[in-house]
Image: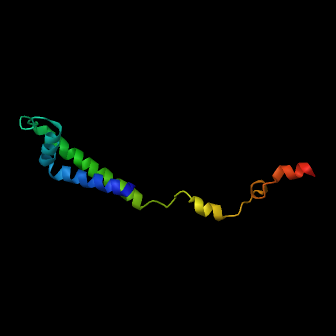
Amino acid sequence: MKALLLLVAGLGGLIEAVAPRRVVALWTRALYRNAGEAEPREWVYAAAKVEGTLIAAGALVGLFRLATADGDFPVDDSTAADEPESDPAIAGGHGDDQAAAE
């Protein structure tokens, strides 16, 4: 699931870095009632390109870290239940009660 989110974010960042004018126009139409009257300044496109580049780079780093992880994943409960218990108090259910009765 995390890899899918990173992939989608990376693709969105790549699109924003490659075509910042289209992305700004899309967001302008989505956010303003009179989008035809709104005209962004020239620095907005440069900022969108930088933002897209940073998002794509961050997603690539996250995907790389996810792909090269050591595999230290939590143990599944179903495999832990198959192992015998080493503590006699837990395994037999008697522990100190049996010693006190003797």
Q: Is residue 57 above or below residue 36?
A: below
Q: Position of residue 38 (x, y in %)?
A: 9, 35
Residue lying furthest right = 102
* Residue 16 shown left or right of residue 61 in the figure: left
**Which residue is depicted at the point 17% across and 42% down?**
27
The foreground one among 95 and 59 is: 95
- 79 vs 16, left or right, is right
Tell me which colouring the rendered structure shows: rainbow
- All told, the count of numbered labels is 0
Residue at x 31%, y 56% (from the top left corner): 7
Give the image location of residue 20, x and y in percent: 15, 47
Q: Is residue 76 shown left or right of residue 14?
A: right
| In the displayed structure image, the side of residue 42 where residue 89 appears, left or right | right
Q: Residue at x 62, y 61 (%)?
A: 80
Measuring from the top left, give residue 69's x and y in whole percent: 45, 59
Where residue 28 sits in the image (x, y, percent)?
14, 40
The quarter in which the N terminus is drawn is bottom left
Residue at 10% across / 39% down in the picture? Answer: 42
